Amino acid sequence: MTNEIGLAFSHPIERSVASGISVDDQDVDRISLRDHIVEVEIGAFEAERGTTQRICFNVVVEVRWNHQAQADDVDRILSYDKVTEAISHELAEERLNLLETLAERVADRILLEPQAVRAFVRIEKLDRGPGALGVEIVRSRRAVPQLVAEDLAVEDAQPTVVYLSNAALASQYLTGWVDALKARNSPVILCVGLPETAPLSTESALVQRRIDLLAIEQNCWRLAALDARCVVVATRTELDWGIKNDQISVWAPSKIVLDTVDIPAPVPGHNAELALWLGEMLQAVKVLVVGGPVPVSALAPVSSSVIVAAVAVENSEI
């Protein structure tokens, strides 16, 4: 028991060695990253938003023994840079609440490398208490082929993003528009703006942003109540699932808008700017604006790469 407890708190490389050879009794080598500390905004608590904290990575990757490494050629081995790049990529992808999610994504990205067969990932928060709070996972390459197939399926399916104004939500043609979109057998994501009734007004820009996003989500549920085929979704995972399964998703924007770290979202409003922002993020084939003006950003000299088209609310066809 003492040895087991000691091993539980040992560095991942000791755990890797203790667990034995992992792949069909083949020899494996191990590369490791110790005490890699970065500052990042992460966490599920409100106190963790808007501020950074230190998190520490310890990673061990088991790789297939490669006799070509004797040639002293860096292009023939799994470089340490691939480990740090996996961490940097996932931290830049979006703001996350859970260390568990971050660990999963880092391990998955490392295991996309052809030489990697198993990854040990330990992540710890260093500033949330008197000690280090963390999570450790072990993942095998066996799960990766399905991961790759799912990623490619999402990348190959370019959705159409449709912004519905309040006038469009009240239109007699709404059900017919949904019928037409469903009949296309291609991914569709619906977006709405602020409701007609003005939300609570505050002097804090950050608080106002949260209130406006919640008001938009109320409008999302209004749309879902008008047509049961429209499913409200909030996360990138739910959006990707809807894209792969031809679901008509209604985008509740709060989580993705607040968690995105690379391209700031526009201010929520009575317009299609957020819909265009989402379309660009998802590499949508087109953004349709029903009953409202084309976003100003799409008319800028450096225009969006997404095709944007307007549909009049009096038009029964979409």
Image: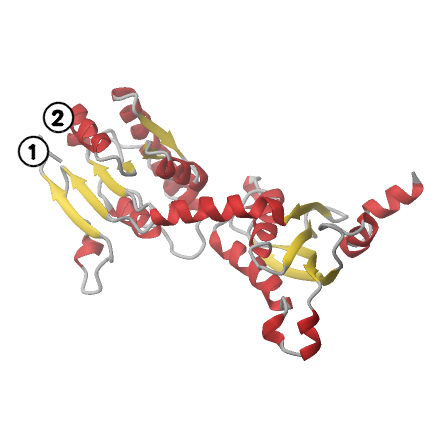
Q: Quadrant of residue 165?
A: top left
The one nearer the camera, 202 or 155, is 155
Q: Residues within 10 Å of mark 1 (few under 14, many from 20)?
A: few
The one nearer the camera, 234 or 154, is 154
The spot of residue 241 in percent (x, y) is: 41, 36
> For mark 1, what is the residue?
315
The one nearer the camera, 85 or 118, is 118
Residue at position x 19%, y 27% from top? 179
Labelled disc at residue 173 = 2
Which amino acid, by three-letter code, is at mark 2?
Tyr
Residue at position x 61%, y 51% from top? 107
* Vertical arrangement, residue 11 with respect to residue 164, above or below: below
Residue at position x 47%, y 53% from top? 93
Which amino acid, by three-letter code, is at mark 1?
Asn
Q: Secondary structure at mark 1?
A: loop
* Vertical arrangement, residue 267 with respect to residue 254, above or below: below
